[in-house]
């Protein structure tokens, strides 16, 4: 009954098994919450129960008196900058004077047992004067600032063509998407160890080691080389780990106590302690000619950034740039604003900005199809972007633009047979017993198309560094790219094997020591960026190898090739195993990879601010119980524009996993915020899809059109599966019910109580007032 | 704190002394922090995600919901106890790896335990029975497709 893994060469294009897979299935992989050090203390963070308050005083005396407590720290104990932030340091390590969101850190405790640390935190007396929280992002834009930097986090306007242009057919709509949580299963956690040089060794789960290091060092008032950040095993991320969580607080505790300190959040603290997807409030007006060609798109988008800046800039720019979606639009008037409120801070989540806008523009396209009397697929095909077309930023699409291909392959796939009349009892919405009446279950089919930019944009100097060392036929790769589960470690090995022909590839631990930044594991960028860096470093070593063999054997290095793990010359004179080709030599090269430069948008939102784009189509089939408002997703079909498939099984994993988060966004996942307070910070009440909720996913096509400029021809594939999957599901629910459903997630009451007064309809006039 | 006790737990067939432990510690905490068995994971500590799944006298439980000091006379099996002794992989573990059922891996040990439990009770589950059996295990990376494929492949291999 024992099984062996299929032997393969482990090159690009193969379904190579993950190098960290064996320890992961055995339970031996060291995640950030698994770490242990001799003499280690436990840290705990005291957080504000109030979304808005004035802090009149903090008394830690009672906490310090508890036996086993070794340190209690507040803002006064932060030696350096008292704030941090991904783009701008506006977020306090510990709140002082004022609290701006529920869950904001107030103090931190280190003690000899986690329960002692929790009790000590509870013994800290904080004299709060609660104030009225500012929770409406529309109102926040013009309201009294709740932060010295003001309430507008970022504003992006785009003006293209003739703002007065009109079309014969006009459709208008108002849409909302809720506050989704990334909900990575690994809790925020880490281990900080004080170092002999006065610095800190921090083992933590993150998405970007070097930017963590920059922020931590500034707060600790230490030089960069004394803040050594090492990647601990990461239990998923999806954007939640782009911002710091407890990196600074845990380091402060370790430096103060001069003992190792471990912090592990529980799930409630995790919900309160990381950023979420910005809720979006979106007003749209589409103009088309009678043939269905888009004439103009107007969009006003308000994003709730919560209390702090985080990555609101990138989210806002994306929402604006992709406001019309992957369609040819000659005229556009778009404005997106992210507002500061006393709601939980929002930042990066898979598909940032592009996902929110997708929900609105795809609903508009369906609405437009109805108004025109056109088939919605035909309408999309008619307006689909092609290579050489311009986005509303004026950027010309010069890369692979297979929009029509993803549409036709996805829409053309066969539909599942049968329907609610014949489906098994257990497969009805809600399962058997919960469906009111089979005759009141309706099937619907929905379609949605998406666009996502890849990698960093807007003129940011986006780079990744990698080192390759070849010794005795074994390659060692060093790169600070963070493995969050996506499979970069597999790809790095595949790439090294492909270039160098070796079988054994060792991956050095990722950290900030001895290697420069690899950039963040976000924006679908690591396959291209750090894959590109690894490939370039391996190619440089390969050139060194040829030069060395050439010198030793007197053959021209241009005559050498690597075939099946051997260095061979075309004339057959040289035929050596790689391990024996340069005995005693260590060949090492470090290379920095950059993608083509991008540029900031001008005052009209015009400019080449992105380097590459990926497109995806999703078709959803749902069964809806009209009386109970329950939805069962029967099937999702998708086509994805991927450039080149580098590891089929990992690619399928990205697609299925992204779609699962789309199922959540469409139907179940929302952080419910009530007057600034999170009402559902648990997996009991914040519901993510289980194996019973996830339908089969059919991949109609991976469109492989190698992307010019991509080191291996591949595009990033992490985000597109999420960008338009939720929209397709909600479109299917609309088709099944005939309801407008302008909000994701669709809740049971939105269906079952549609048209009754109990369903809130936030006024879209608010947007018109703040973004005239 | 004064609520500290000494006791023994039988984990994976071996008795372990638990010394001077706070009475309120969960089985999950004791396994992870006192016995050096971090394979059982702590994704929610609320009994919702299944990442801490263990077998307690042969029954699948969330170890985060079990008070360690209440498990004194129990036979506890963790993911570490389901690994072959030769450092190899069980057929379930190998299938998870080969089929792509592992991404970040945080849910994986819990899935290994619950799939082991399912297939020992029911060697031929239907697709729906598999989904039902693992519906107490949350995965945020895979969308479950490759995990379900792994279970199917084990079923098929065991049939032969």
Image (cartoon, coloured by chain):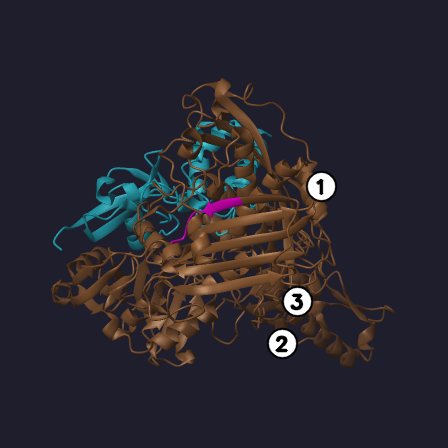
**Label 1 residue SS:** helix
- Does residue A609 appear left or right of residue A440 in this picture? right
Which stretch appears magenta? A173-188
Q: Is residue A713 above or below residue A650?
A: below
Q: Is residue B155 visible?
A: yes
Q: Quadrant of residue A700?
A: top right
Assess disc 2: are there few (<14), some (14-19) or many (≥20) residues with their C-alpha within 10 Å of its C-alpha: many
Q: Which mark is residue A619?
A: none
Nearest to the observer: residue A270 or residue A663:
A663
Colour-to-chain, cyan: B
Nearest to the observer: residue A629 or residue A152:
A152
Q: Quadrant of residue A346?
A: bottom left
Q: Position of residue A419 (x, y in %)?
A: 58, 23
Assess disc 1: are there few (<14), some (14-19) or many (≥20) residues with their C-alpha within 10 Å of its C-alpha: some
Q: What colour denotes chain A?
A: brown
Nearest to the observer: residue A33 or residue A139:
A139
Label 2 or label 3, whichever comes before in sequence order = 3
User: Can you identify the residue that label 3 sits on?
Assistant: A535
* Image quadrant occupied by the N terminus of chain A: top right
User: Can you identify the residue that label 1 sits on?
Assistant: A408
């Amino acid at each position: 009954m024992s099984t062996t893994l299929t032997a393969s060469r482990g090159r690009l294009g193969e379904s190579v098994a993950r190098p960290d897979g064996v320890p992961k299935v055995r339970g031996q992989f060291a995640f950030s919450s698994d770490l242990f050090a001799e003499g280690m203390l436990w840290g705990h963070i005291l957080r504000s129960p109030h979304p808005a308050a004035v802090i009149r005083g903090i008394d830690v005396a009672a906490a310090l008196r508890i036996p086993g407590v070794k340190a209690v720290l507040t803002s006064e104990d932060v030696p350096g900058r008292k704030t941090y932030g991904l783009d701008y340091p506006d977020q306090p390590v510990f709140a002082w004077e004022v609290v701006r969101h529920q869950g904001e850190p107030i103090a931190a405790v280190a003690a000899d047992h986690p329960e002692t640390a929790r009790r000590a935190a509870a013994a800290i007396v904080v004299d709060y004067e609660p104030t009225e929280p500012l929770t409406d992002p529309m109102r926040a834009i013009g309201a009294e600032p709740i932060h010295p930097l003001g309430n507008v986090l970022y504003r992006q306007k785009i003006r293209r063509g003739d703002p007065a242009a009109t079309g014969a057919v006009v459709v208008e709509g108002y849409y909302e998407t809720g506050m989704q949580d990334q909900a990575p299963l690994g809790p925020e956690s880490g281990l900080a160890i004080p170092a002999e040089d006065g610095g800190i060794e921090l083992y933590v789960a993150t998405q970007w080691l070097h930017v963590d290091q920059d922020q931590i060092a500034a707060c600790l008032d230490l030089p960069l080389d004394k803040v050594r950040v090492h990647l601990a095993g990461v239990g998923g991320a999806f954007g939640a780990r782009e911002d710091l969580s407890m990196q600074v607080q845990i380091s402060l505790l370790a430096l103060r106590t001069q003992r190792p300190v471990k912090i592990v959040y529980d799930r409630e603290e995790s919900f309160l302690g990381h950023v979420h997807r910005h809720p979006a409030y979106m007003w749209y007006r589409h103009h088309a000619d009678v043939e269905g060609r888009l004439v103009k798109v107007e969009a006003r988008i308000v994003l709730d950034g919560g209390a702090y800046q985080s990555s609101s800039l990138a989210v806002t720019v994306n929402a604006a740039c992709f406001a019309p979606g992957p369609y040819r639009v000659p005229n556009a008037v778009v404005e997106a604003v992210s507002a500061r409120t006393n709601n939980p801070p929002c930042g990066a989540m898979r598909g940032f900005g592009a996902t929110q806008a997708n929900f609105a523009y795809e609903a508009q396209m369906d609405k437009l199809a109805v108004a025109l009397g056109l088939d919605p697929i035909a309408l999309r095909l008619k307006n689909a972007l092609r290579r050489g077309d311009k986005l509303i930023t004026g950027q010309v699409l010069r890369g692979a633009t297979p929009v029509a291909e993803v549409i036709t392959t996805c829409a053309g796939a066969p539909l599942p047979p049968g329907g609610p009349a014949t489906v098994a009892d257990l497969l009805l919405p809600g399962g058997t017993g919960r469906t009111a009446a089979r005759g009141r279950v309706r099937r619907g089919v929905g379609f949605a198309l998406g666009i996502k930019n890849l990698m960093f944009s807007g003129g940011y100097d986006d780079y990744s560094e990698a080192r390759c060392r070849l010794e005795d036929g074994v390659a060692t790769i060093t790169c600070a790219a963070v493995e969050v589960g996506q499979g970069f470690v597999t790809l790095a090995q595949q790439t090294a094997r492909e270039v160098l022909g070796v079988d054994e590839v060792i991956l050095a631990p990722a950290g900030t020591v001895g290697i420069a930044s690899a950039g963040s594991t976000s924006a679908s960028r690591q396959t291209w960026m750090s894959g590109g860096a690894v490939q370039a470093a391996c190619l440089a070593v390969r050139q060194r190898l040829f030069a060395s063999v050439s010198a030793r054997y007197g053959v021209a290095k241009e005559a050498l090739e690597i075939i099946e793990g051997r260095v061979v010359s075309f004339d057959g004179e040289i035929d050596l195993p790689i391990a024996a080709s340069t005995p005693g030599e260590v060949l090492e090269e470090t290379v920095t990879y950059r993608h083509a430069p991008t540029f900031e948008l001008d005052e009209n939102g015009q400019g080449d601010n992105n380097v590459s784009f990926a497109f995806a189509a999703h078709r959803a089939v749902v069964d809806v119980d009209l009386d109970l408002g329950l939805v069962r997703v029967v099937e999702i079909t998708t086509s994805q524009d991927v450039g080149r498939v580098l590891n089929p099984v990992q690619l399928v994993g990205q697609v299925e996993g992204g779609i699962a988060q789309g199922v959540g966004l469409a139907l179940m996942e929302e952080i419910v915020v009530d007057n600034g307070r999170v009402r559902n910070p648990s997996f009991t009440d914040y519901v993510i899809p289980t194996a019973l909720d996830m339908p089969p996913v059919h991949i109609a096509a991976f469109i492989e059109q190698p992307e010019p400029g991509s080191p291996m021809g591949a595009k990033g594939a992490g985000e597109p599966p999420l960008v338009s999957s939720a929209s397709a599901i909600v479109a299917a629910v609309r088709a099944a019910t005939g309801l407008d459903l302008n909000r994701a997630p669709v809740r049971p009451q939105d269906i079952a109580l549609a048209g009754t007064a109990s369903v809130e309809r936030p006024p879209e006039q608010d947007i018109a007032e703040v973004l005239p | 704190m004064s609520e500290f006790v000494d006791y023994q737990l039988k984990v994976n067939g071996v008795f372990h002394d638990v010394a001077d432990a706070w009475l309120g510690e969960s089985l999950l905490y004791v396994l992870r922090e006192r016995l050096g068995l971090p394979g059982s994971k702590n994704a929610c500590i609320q009994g919702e995600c299944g990442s801490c799944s263990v077998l307690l006298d042969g029954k699948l439980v969330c170890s985060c919901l079990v008070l360690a000091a209440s498990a004194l006379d129990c036979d506890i099996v963790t993911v570490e106890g389901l690994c072959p002794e030769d450092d190899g992989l069980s057929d379930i573990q190998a299938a998870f790896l080969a089929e792509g059922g592992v991404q970040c891996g945080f849910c994986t040990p819990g899935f290994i335990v619950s799939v082991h439990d399912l297939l020992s009770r029911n060697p031929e589950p239907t697709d729906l029975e598999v989904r039902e059996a693992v519906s107490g295990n949350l995965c945020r990376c895979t969308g479950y497709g490759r995990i379900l494929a792994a279970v199917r492949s084990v079923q098929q291999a065991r049939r032969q």
